[in-house]
Image (spheres, grey):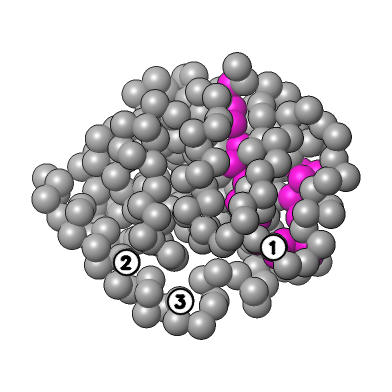
Amino acid sequence: MPKVSILLPVYNGEAYLEACLQGVLSQTFTDFEVWIGDDGSRDRTWEILARYADPRLHLVQHPQNLGLFGNLQTLAPKATGEILRFLCQDDVLLPHCLAEEVAFYEGHPEVGVAFPKFQSVDTQGQVMSVAALHDLPPVCPIPLSVQLLYYHGCIAANLSPLSIRHSVFREIGGFDVTMRISGDYDLLSRAAVRYPLGVIHQHLLQIRSHARQLSRSTGANLRCLQENQRIRALLAPHFP
């Protein structure tokens, strides 16, 4: 069984999918598998995926659209790795990402969920900004994590930085598929009320900013506010 299972949900991802897969296949740490769920794409996504012959890549084609977190929840039971690592189709893992994340989990067995810092890039892959380093402790105890998540929202900022121990993912029931926008924030919060949160102070991936991101879709802001209210209600009883 591989050490890491990467879960890659895809929907109409032809624009940046090849760059995303190249980042995965260029990792210095090679003990991983990738489960890719095509969520009913209507572009060249499946054609692009079918070109890859690497045995670590496993393709799943959903006959109907499940949504981002429904897609991930369907892929997760197929994964066999000790660590589940999530990745969006627009984003790129830098070559030493998995190696550093595995080393972090091995060095901090108390941590249940973790995320590294990242670079923000534009549509051409040019770096626009980088996340601050050393602004949080590398291991956040539960009371601190609860307050950070309550007051600052999803401090990982995106789904792509997130990874979680597979055992913890199963323990908390995985993603809430009723969430359309804030499922990453919800998963992070439910893990962080049970286990210390890890923050890896290295820029290990690139998050792409573009007009077709889910968070910029019609109605996303209102849906996000509604979902975030539910998450804060979950966090509030855990305040110190």
Q: Quadrant of residue 108?
A: top left
Q: How far apart are marks 3 and 1 (CA)?
A: 20 Å
Q: Name the residue under label 2.
A: 227
Determine whether label 2 and label 3 are within 8 Å by CB: no
Q: Name the residue under label 1.
A: 41
Q: In percent of the image, x 54 and y 76: which residue is there? A: 216
Q: What stretch is highlighted in magenta?
A: 3-23
Q: How far apart are marks 1 and 2 (CA)?
A: 26 Å
Amino acid, disc 1: Ser
Is residue 143 or residue 187 the one in the foreground?
Answer: 187
Q: Distance between the residues labelled 2 and 3?
A: 10 Å
Q: Position of residue 220 (x, y in %)?
A: 45, 76
Q: Where is residue 229 in the image (x, y as percent from the top left)?
A: 25, 67
Q: Identify the image quadrant of the C terminus.
A: top left
Q: Mark 3 points at which residue?
A: 220
Q: Nearer the viewer, mark 1 or mark 2?
A: 1
- The mark nearer the N terminus, 1 or 2, is 1
Q: In percent of the image, x 65 and y 68: which residue is there? A: 209
